Image (cartoon, rainbow, N blue to C red):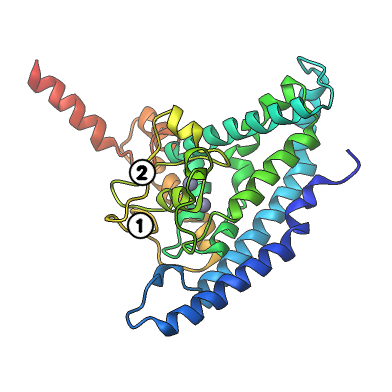
């Protein structure tokens, strides 16, 4: 491919900006009409929005540097040892799209269930606001968490690295548009597409909603692998994370979970097993859980 795919999101920047501007002015106009404030969690605040912008920029720069440094080199090596020769056709593009979306689902599910990956992904969930600009809230540490590993199989199968990266970026571009509270349910689309409604659920910390709807573009994967939940009118979404952070500082947002994770792993009086489990276990895992389990096993015997 001639075009440098890295610039897809940058090229779409003006369109994203236009939609954000529209959402901002629409919300402000509506807010004046409502007697009681609605959608307060959608309102743009300077601190939140500027923070999102900085995080997007930091993410882009880190992604660019890491692609040049090693990601494209690894992909290049895998592609050299590819399993199949895939010719460009409508069918091969459809298969690429499905593969990318499938692996995105597992990347995202892993990001919520393995602390090493959550340390990066948590950034996206730290805001108690949800609007289009929330899509920009990304982490510069994704390359360390290993996001790129999830697309490696597609390259190894035989898709050109640039094409795979392009597919990932297009998926992220699509996902920009589902970060909004202004769009209700979209009829038949709700059945197979990841929609604003489904993604609002994903950003919520309500016990009914938490850790659900990991999809990128198609919601079918959540339905297949039992992680789908429908947004309900009687359960309004509460956005954010269970251990809520209040900071708007992009550096703090980027590194707070890494700090907490290593702090947990390096605490005194722990077995090596428990130290490692702080890295790959569930983000909420603490050694007491294992101790309690052992204690209950002993009392039951
Ligand atoms: Zn997520
Ligand atoms: Zn999101």
**Residue 249 position (above or below residue 89):** below
Q: Residue at x 35, y 32 (%)?
A: 274
Spot occupied by residue 243 in the image (x, y as percentages of width and height)? 34, 55
From the image, state whether disc 1 or disc 2 is nearer to you: 1
Disc 1/disc 2 C-alpha distance (Å) = 35 Å
Q: Is mark 2 within 8 Å of ligand 1?
A: no
The secondary structure type at the circle numbered 2 is: loop
Dot 2, crowdedness within 10 Å: few (<14), some or many (≥20)?
few
Q: Which mark is residue 88?
A: none
Hey, which quadrant is residue 164 in on the image? top right
Image quarter (top left, top right, bottom left or bottom right) of the N terminus? top right
Spot occupied by residue 63 in the image (x, y as percentages of width and height)? 70, 48
Q: How many marks?
A: 2
Which of these two is toward me, 272 or 24?
24
Image quarter (top left, top right, bottom left or bottom right) of the C terminus? top left
Disc 1 to disc 2: CB gap under 8 Å: no
117 left or right, relative to 230? right
Q: Residue at x 47, y 39 (%)?
A: 191
Spot occupied by residue 61 in the image (x, y as percentages of width and height)? 72, 55
Work out whether mark 1 precedes mark 2 in sequence or the reverse, and give the earlier one: 1
Q: Residue furthest front?
A: 187
**Residue 194 position (above or below residue 139):** above
**Residue 98 position (above or below residue 285):** above
Which of these two is toward me, 5 or 62?
5
Q: Which residue is mark 1?
A: 237
Q: Which residue is mark 2?
A: 267
Hey, which quadrant is residue 271 in on the image? top left
Q: Residue at x 74, y 26 (%)?
A: 155
The secondary structure type at the circle numbered 1 is: loop
Q: Is mark 1 within 8 Å of ligand 2?
A: no
Dot 1, crowdedness within 10 Å: few (<14), some or many (≥20)?
many
160 left or right, relative to 15? right
């Amino acid at each position: 491919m001639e075009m440098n795919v890295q610039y897809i999101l940058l090229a779409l920047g003006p369109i994203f900006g236009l939609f954000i501007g529209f959402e901002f002015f629409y919300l402000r106009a509506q807010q004046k009409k409502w007697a009681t404030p609605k959608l307060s969690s959608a309102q743009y605040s300077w601190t939140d929005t500027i923070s999102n912008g900085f995080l997007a920029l930091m993410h882009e720069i880190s992604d660019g540097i890491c692609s040049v440094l090693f990601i494209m080199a690894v992909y290049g090596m895998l592609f050299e040892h590819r399993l199949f020769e895939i010719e460009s056709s409508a069918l091969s593009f459809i298969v690429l799209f499905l593969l990318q979306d499938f692996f995105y689902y597992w990347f995202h599910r892993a990001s919520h269930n393995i602390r090493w990956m959550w340390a990066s992904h948590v950034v996206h969930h730290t805001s108690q606001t949800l609007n289009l600009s929330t899509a920009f809230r990304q982490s510069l540490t994704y390359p360390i968490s290993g996001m790129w590993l999830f697309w490696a199989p597609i390259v190894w199968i035989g898709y050109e690295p640039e094409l795979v990266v392009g597919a990932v970026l297009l998926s992220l571009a699509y996902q920009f548009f589902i970060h909004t509270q202004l769009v209700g349910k979209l009829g038949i689309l709700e059945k197979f597409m990841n929609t604003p409604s489904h993604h609002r659920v994903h950003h919520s910390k309500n016990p009914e909603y938490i850790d659900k709807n990991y999809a990128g573009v198609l919601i079918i994967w959540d339905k297949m692998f039992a992680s789908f939940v429908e947004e309900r009118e009687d359960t309004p979404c509460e956005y954010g994370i269970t251990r809520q952070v209040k900071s708007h500082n992009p550096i703090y947002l980027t590194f707070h979970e890494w700090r907490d994770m290593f702090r947990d792993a390096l605490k005194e009086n722990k077995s090596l097993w428990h130290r490692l489990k702080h890295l790959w276990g569930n983000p909420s895992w603490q050694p007491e859980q294992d101790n309690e389990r052992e204690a209950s096993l002993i009392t039951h015997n």
